[in-house]
């Protein structure tokens, strides 16, 4: 009886896109896990999320991504924790996945 009175909702275009990106983000997290990365943060500041990961000692996988040009360096700097560092990102399932690692000399 309750089903007869259910309201049907339509999702506007912007919300459809946001929903699609959330599904892609879920798939990207599974992909990160398969690579051995740990998700630290998901940034929802724009409509398309961005995932920040810790590479957790998987430097060989990171090097492979960089050498195959699937990862791109986008930043570098110096801080107390890492010393000289580089920021990289790759696209997984259409979602930007980024990390910082100690700069290789």
Image (tube, rainbow, N blue to C red):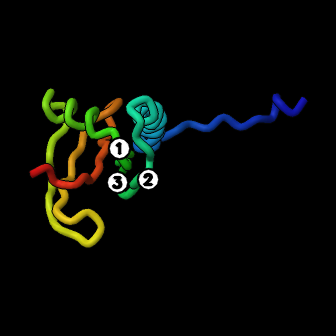
Residue that label 3 marks: 46
Q: Which label belongs to residue 25?
A: none
Q: Which residue is mark 2?
A: 40
Helix, strand or loop at disc 1? loop
Q: Quadrant of the N terminus?
A: top right
Chain-order first, disc 3 or disc 2: 2
Quadrant housing residue 2? top right
Q: Is residue 99 above or below residue 10?
A: below
Q: Which residue is mark 1?
A: 57
Quadrant of residue 63 within the rendered picture: top left
Asked if the residue under mark 3 is in contact with the one under mark 1, i.e. CB atoms within 8 Å, the reply is: no
Kindly state the secondary structure of the residue where label 3 is placed.
loop
The residue mark sitting in front, 3 or 2, is 2
Labels 2 and 1: the sequence-earlier one: 2
Mark 1 packing: few (<14 Cα in 10 Å), some, or many (20+)? few
Classify 10 Å Cα crowding around label 2: few (below 14), some (14-19), many (20 and above): few
Q: Secondary structure at mark 2?
A: strand
Q: Is 68 left or right of 7, judged from the image as shown?
A: left
Q: Is residue 16 visible?
A: no
Residue 20 drawn at (x, y percent)? 44, 34
Q: Position of residue 73 (x, y in %)?
A: 14, 47
Q: 52 or 22, which is in the foreground?
A: 52
Q: Quadrant of residue 44?
A: bottom left
- Residue at image x 15%, y 41%? 72
User: Is residue 72 depicted above or below 69 in this figure?
Assistant: below
**In front of the other: 40 or 60:** 60
Badge nearest the viewer, 1 or 3: 1
Q: Is residue 22 above or below residue 82?
A: above
**Gap between marks 2 and 1, in whole Å?**
15 Å
């Amino acid at each position: 009886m309750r089903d007869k009175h259910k309201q049907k909702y339509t999702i506007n275009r912007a919300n459809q896109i946001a929903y699609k990106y959330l599904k892609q983000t879920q798939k990207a997290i599974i992909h990160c896990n398969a690579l051995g990365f740990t998700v630290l943060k998901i940034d929802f500041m724009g409509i398309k999320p961005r995932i920040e990961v810790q590479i957790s000692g998987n430097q060989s996988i990171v090097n492979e991504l960089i050498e195959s040009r699937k990862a791109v360096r986008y930043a570098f700097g110096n801080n107390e924790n890492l010393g000289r560092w580089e920021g990289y990102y790759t696209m997984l399932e259409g979602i930007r996945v980024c990390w910082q690692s100690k700069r290789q000399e």
